[in-house]
Amino acid sequence: MMKRAIFLKGKNGEKNILAKFVLPLTGAEETTLTMAAGTAFRVEVNGNFVFYGPLRAEHGVALIHTFDLTPYLTAGKNTLSVFVMAYNIYSYYQPKDTAFFTAEVRCGEKTYTQNDFSAFYLPQKEQKVQRYSYQRTFSEVYDLRREEIPCETENVPFPTLRTHGLAYPYMGVIPFTAIERGVAEQREGLYSYAIPGYARVSGGDMGYADSEITVNLYNEVNRMYFCPEGEGRADYRYTLYDLGANKTGFIEYTLTANSEVTVYALFDEILLEEEKGDPAKATTVHPNLLRLSPMRSDTVNCVKVTFPRGEYHFSSFEPYTMRYLKLVVLGEGIIQGASMRLYENAEVTATFKTDNEKLNAVWEAAVSTFQQNAVDVLTDCPSRERAGWLCDSSFTAESERLFTGKNTVENHFLTVILNHGCGQLPNGVFPMCYPADHPTGQFIPNWDMWLIVELKNYLARTRDSALIQSYAPKIHALLDFFTTYENEDGLLEKLPSWVFVEWSRANEFVQDVNYPSNMFYAYVLEIASELYGNFVWKEKAEKVRETVRKQAFDGTYFRDHAIRENGKLVLQEDITETCQYYALYTGLVTKETHPAFYANVMQTFGPFRNAEITQPKVHKANAFVGNYMRLELWLREENYEKVLLESVEFFYKMALRTGTLWEHDNPGASCCHGFASKVAVYLAQACLGYHGTDVNGTPVFGDKFVSKNALATFPVNGKTMRIEIKNGKRTVTY
């Protein structure tokens, strides 16, 4: 049993420290490594990649990982190396916990522990660099001319260790394809990206201040002027590569360095002309960037490595998301090939094929989006953040059930949220994303409401009442917290922190009384009442609904908010499309109670409305959550023609361009966002009439479906269910 944790002596608590722990092994006997480490680690045998981790958990907790090393061993001498990163800064990506390493290696009859490993400090990793993004930790800069330094170890606090039921991710390797070559030179006075204000830090627990940074990737990349081969001074040579679709994993390349060589790996999910919507603008807006804009999403999409002369196979330490990779070489170096070692969920077994190729492409994009966002927790995006966000998780969890027949990742995520150790938040509040740190105390009250929705759906999917009951005290505390913001009408007023309705103009009308938030408040009060048998919450829910209908409805639309002026609430003129969807989605009004309102909203609005011509005073909805709510409203009445009409072209443009599904209705932000994978659930219902499983795990089918010819398989209760549709007739077999 592992009972002692160690780290490099004198380095514990330092930021951005890379340690290596080495154990020599002899022979190819059956060998098992059981270990835990934090904050991030990589396992290698004889220089060959075995695993990257950890699978994340809450503050002060580390998951136990077990690996069979036997396939990696040779008959002679072997070297087991465990690289451990100590980031020691706050992030949305990993909790700020003490770096440590603990292990047990069983090799035949012999047993080794962490005490038998030699320890090294690796100054090859540049320590004082910029954060990769505001949400994640440090960018990667290496100087391999530096030598590793043997180091003593010391005991560090031993974390709580826990086993887990998560499947290890798929880590296969896929090649990049070269699509363009050219040269670059260093110039001054070019267009420059700057670190955004919100991402600038003044040191301390957030990273290194500008004055402390020794390698500034923003400045170095901004001085690169790219041009076609044959033009310019050729200070650098570059190759632009394409994966064919967005993928997440580790950048790998093989290099022959005939002198000292520096390689910059620049990457992004899209090309610059795609962001601008006009190929010509790729060279007129930011001419020095030439097609690839690595800082486009306020990230440092750059890994810099300096090599001495020699032969190398390099792999980035962290996983990143990209379709395009540009390797820029300074010096006499030759890149033999570039590839990505994938880092994605390995449990998808569902298949889907119809005679409509657009539907098939959207399905595949949904699968890929899910795989990249469901390794250990349900993340929003695998790129800029890798953060497990509430609300997003409620949608992605439905995809997990459809694709895998299980909710393993969701169960782990909800367990971690339940046990969160984020003491920086008000009493009763859950972190908006986790495992993470929130030193400013920021949270999203709306996302805490979405947690209650997810708990209801999780219970229906899994019948795991034990986890639901474990949440009971904390849900009571959360609703007690909301009670302190109820005004004299019983409505939530002046909710604190980051009140979030949607990425649209709807987010500008959140104070003082935001009606979408109150619609949702009533919705979750009723759900909580059902989960925990508290009928007071149900009564309160109906009172909130009645008050919102009275205050916000102008006879045609629901207004978004009211402002308190001279002690009285004054209804404002602002109206958003999203607010109308909240009213219908939450059951505040229905097709039956307000038929004219329902018909107007569902016939007038939608993702393809030209808001400058049609109802210009009603601000347009964005993809999440407005357009998704709209799709679910169509699903409720089984209007599958509308579901496909409003979703296929909307999502197909994403599938065509990145092979994944986006955060917004444009590629300006993440182009691989976990919640968007739920479109596969819509396709299964609309195309096949498959509604998932009921509380007993029995498949549920509707009489309506639109496919004439289709073949799909889904994992159900440990079996494979086959749905075949021929000439409009459906057959289900196991």
Image: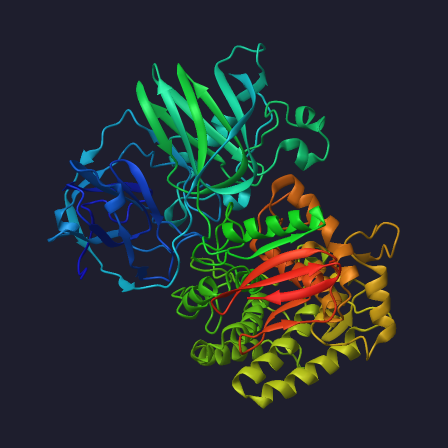
Chosen colour scheme: rainbow
Residue 357 in the image, given as x and y percentages of width and height: 70, 46
Residue 582 visible somewhere in the drawing: yes
Which residue is depicted at the point 65% across and 45% down? 655
Residue 342 in the image, given as x and y percentages of width and height: 45, 43
Image quadrant where one finds the C terminus: bottom right
The answer to whether 153 is drawn above or below residue 279 in the figure is below
Which residue is depicted at the point 70% across and 44% down? 653
Residue 112 in the image, given as x and y percentages of width and height: 14, 51
Work out whether residue 56 or residue 631 is closer to the camera in this orientation and state it.
631
Which residue is depicted at the point 85% across and 75% down? 595
The answer to whether 33 is drawn above or below residue 498 in the figure is above
Outermost residue toward the left? 109
Give the image quarter of residue 214.
top left
The answer to whether 191 is drawn above or below residue 417 in the figure is above
Residue 26 in the image, given as x and y percentages of width and height: 13, 40
Give the image quarter of residue 557.
bottom right
Which residue is depicted at the point 85% across and 62% down? 603
Image quadrant where one finds the N terminus: bottom left
How many badges with numbers are in the image? 0
Using residue 573 as the reference point, say whether residue 528 is left or right of it.
Answer: left
Residue 565 visible somewhere in the drawing: no
The answer to whether 624 is drawn above or below residue 448 in the figure is above
